[in-house]
Amino acid sequence: AFGTLNPSEFTIMSLPSYRAAIIGCGRKGSTIDSEDRWLVNYDLAPCSHASAYCAHPRTDLIAGASGSEKSADDFRQRWQVPRVYTNYLEMLHKERPDVVSITTHASLHAPITLAAAQSGVKGVLVEKAMATSVEEAEAMIAACQDNGVKLLVNHPRRFHATFHRARHFLQEGKIGDLQMLAVTGYGKLMHNGSHVFDLLRDFCGDVAWVTGDLKQTDDPEDPDGRAMIKMQNGVTAFLDFASGQPFEFIFFGTEGRMVIDQFRDGVTLVNYEPENPDEVGPWFRYRPKREARRHYFNKQPMQPPMLSAVEELVTALDDGREPVSNGEDGLRCIETGIAAHLSALNGSAPVHLPIADKRFQVISR
């Protein structure tokens, strides 16, 4: 069985079940569990939306919709759902689901979210990147608010134990005051970089300004790229998604650094201290503390991030509150990526947030 949620934890019989449907029956909606997975994102099944709904004790997967008849039929057979559709509007009208996942390409997220919100659903779980423009994201948020719909944007690392631990270590001052972050990764500045844009805001608060540089690739809409991001709290982040490096997230503080990489579960802390604690300067004279390097593995069993996202939406519906990684978070995430594109088009000049051109589009996968 997928996941770690124990149905015995849900002993209150009055808690409702939610009927779930998926629009977009491809990789993220259905098939990613069949792939070789990697750490700090999709290391634990369930990874697809369909498998997460099947694993959660309070959601029932009832239908799927895809523009392709073959994809829809493959989805029906894989997940044994009673009905599939090639028209999502027909599905929304006939099935009346409580919760809808939108796992299409980003260019379709806005119109489908608006249709779902107006159809009477209670919750929408949309894949990142949330939309292709600030205008689209604002329309999605407004439609959900106007219709009492909870909107959750699936940034998987928000729900991953490694990044939960990193957040706690920062809050506890394990590396002193955070000064800078350096992040490497590969490909598509908006599609893949959106993970980082969202986490930066989660760790550091809102963005002040962004500079960007785009690489010439076979995807002119969302190419590989680099960005420097200045947070309002003074922290600076450097992103390189153009050099084809493995994913690595390094936090630099006044008393050490913290490292997350895609090849090792958990978080590494490296602490240092002045050579002479009684000497005021120079500041560059550091030595490692005794037993300065330590790796912290995640506690097991670990909750799969996709299952945690479904659980977050369910509990937000129960409690009548906004979910973690909500529409506002999704909007600010894509705004950062759009600012990097706007900067690159203007000779890498800084672009201050909020951006003025709400219609400017970055069409990611």
Image (spheres, grey):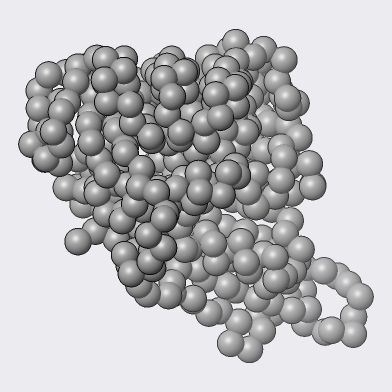
Where, quadrant-wise, is the N terminus in this rendering?
A: bottom left
Residue sitting at x 13%, y 33%:
82
Left or right of 4, for residue 243: right
Compared to 307, does 289 lie above or below? below
Q: Is residue 232 visible in the rendered structure shown here?
A: yes
Give the side of residue 312 with respect to residue 99, left or right.
right
Residue at the (65%, 37%) spot, across then down: 228
Q: Is residue 60 above or below residue 116?
A: below
Q: Residue at x 86, y 70 (%)?
A: 282
Who is closer to the viewer here, 75 or 63? 63
Q: Nearer the viewer, residue 139 or 348?
A: 139
- Looking at this rendering, what residue extends furthest in the front direction? 14
| Image spot of residue 128 (x, y percent) | 45, 34
Observer-nearest residue: 100 or 2? 100
**Above or below 338: residue 285:** below
Residue 11: percent from the left, percent from the top? 38, 66
